[in-house]
Image: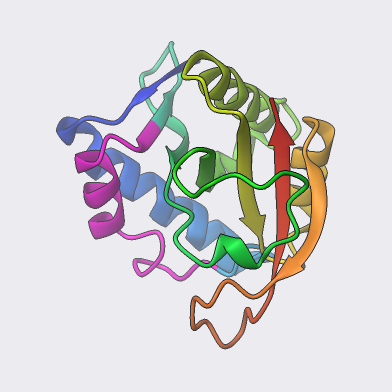
Amino acid sequence: MIIRQCTDKDIAAVSRFYDHVVQYLCAHINYPKWSYQEYPSADYVRQMTAGQSQFVCMDEDNHTVIGAFVLNNDPQGAYENAAWSRQLPEGSYLVCHTLAAEPALSGTGLGTQIVNFCIDYAKKNGYPAIRLDVVPDNIPAKRLYEKCGFTYTGEADLDRGIDEIPLFSMYERNL
């Protein structure tokens, strides 16, 4: 697997990948409560790519997208409402968003590889912590992050205005 920053030429493939994942989730259990072509959308992928925050995971053999995620220092919500173990100013920690792995590869360790890449990236770039939020019912994501050394810090209202998700489960990994 190759993990790298998304380029303009990857936007269509990464957008199709997210659509594929959301369709799968909607046909099974939509743990993150993502909406087909709304979130994550092609516009979101384009915006995150322009900001050098969108990452793509490619299968080395057939050059297909098998994972995608966003890493930046923008919490996209009121992270100050969370009960973090350390007080860090916004912008000084790394935030992981919209992490998705190919559903057909569930159980192969792909998610763990992606999260470990995020941890290594944060360390190499001098971030003191990685933080993220998870929909409270997203048990698979919670298990993944906890397995990778993240600590649950409680639930918080991130003031995102999403009626069906009033609170998010907050996770951190101090480095």
Q: Is residue 58 above or below residue 84?
A: above
Q: In the image shown, does 32 or 51 lie closer to the viewer?
A: 51
Which residue reaches farthest bottom? 163
Q: Which residues are magenta?
A: 34-55
Query: Along the horizontal axis of the image, is 45 left or right of 113?
Result: left
Query: Along the horizontal axis of the image, is 115 left or right of 91?
Result: right
Rendered-image quadrant of the C terminus: top right
Residue at image point 24% right, 41% down: 51
Residue at image point 64% right, 68% down: 81
Q: Position of residue 17 (x, y in %)?
A: 40, 45
Query: Along the horizontal axis of the image, is 61 left or right of 146?
Result: left
Q: Position of residue 108 (x, y in %)?
A: 72, 26
39 part of magenta stretch: yes
Q: Is residue 130 above or below residue 43?
A: above
Residue at image point 48% right, 55% down: 75
Q: In the image shown, does 6 or 15 lie closer to the viewer?
A: 6
Would you identify the image quadrant in which residue 137 lies? bottom right
Q: In the image shown, does 145 or 158 lie closer to the viewer?
A: 158
Q: Position of residue 155 (x, y in %)?
A: 76, 67
Q: In the image shown, does 73 or 2 lie closer to the viewer?
A: 73
151 part of magenta stretch: no
Q: How is the image coloured?
A: rainbow
Would you identify the image quadrant in which residue 154 lies? bottom right
